[in-house]
Every structure is written in structure tokens, then in C-alpha cells.
Amino acid sequence: MNTTLDRLRVLLVKDYKLEPDRLTPDAPLEALGIDSLGVAELMFNIEDEFEVTIPGDPVTLATVGDVVRYIDGLVATQQAGAALGSVAAAGAVPGR
């Protein structure tokens, strides 16, 4: 099973040509050459890879570990919201 960190590493290696051994949870994004524009681009790639929607709220992500926790939070929140939506739809009564 691939963890969020594993999947993020693949993304960072592919898109930013980074060495996988540099991609530890405490690695600062800036030290990896990922500036604010790079983080914005990364967010689009995260949406595609993890099938989540990135909210418009600004977020500070300083390390690889911050990104992993952010992704995990999005996945959990959005899966919970989808599950609640499914329950609500299942309980809907046609014609009302």
C-alpha cells in the first residue's frame, strides 16, 4: 500500500526532478527549490493525484511533512463529506 508520503514523493520526483532520498517529512520545500509558485503548481497536481479539491483558503506549507498532513486532512474531510452526502441522498424521498 502506498502512503501519502510515497505518492507525494513520486509526484515530486516526476514534476520537480528531485532525488527521492531528499524527500523526508522534515525537508523544507524551499530548500528543495519549491517556491510559492511551485507550491501553487503542486496543489494542482495534488488535486489530480489524490482526487481532492483544494479550497481557496491560503495555507502555509513549509515542509514535505506539512504537505502530507494537509493532503491527509483534505482526503479525510472530503471523504467524510461525500459519505454524509450519500447518506442524505439515500434518505431523500422522491417528490418532496
Image: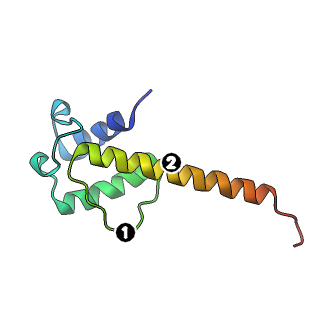
Number of marks in the rendered image: 2
Check the image and tell me how it is coloured: rainbow
* Residue type, numbered disc 1: Asp
* Residue type, numbered disc 2: Ala
Kindly identify the residue that appears in the image at 27 percent across and 42 percent down.
65
Question: On the rendered image, what quadrant is the N terminus found in?
Answer: top left
Mark 2 packing: few (<14 Cα in 10 Å), some, or many (20+)? few
Q: Which mark is residue 6?
A: none
- Image position, residue 2 (x, y; %): 41, 30
The residue tagged with tag 2: helix, strand or loop? helix
Question: Along the horizontal axis of the image, is 47 left or right of 11?
Answer: right
1 in relation to 38, above or below:
above
Q: CA distance from mark 2 to mark 1?
A: 17 Å
Kindly identify the residue that appears in the image at 20 percent across and 63 percent down.
37
Q: Which residue is mark 1?
A: 57
- Image position, residue 84 (x, y; %): 66, 55
Q: Which mark is residue 76?
A: 2
Kindly identify the residue that appears in the image at 42 percent across and 52 percent down.
48
Kindly identify the residue that appears in the image at 17 percent across and 30 percent down.
21
Q: Mark 2 or 1 closer to N-term? A: 1
The residue tagged with tag 1: helix, strand or loop? loop
Question: Along the horizontal axis of the image, is 53 left or right of 69?
Answer: right
- Image position, residue 46 (x, y; %): 37, 51
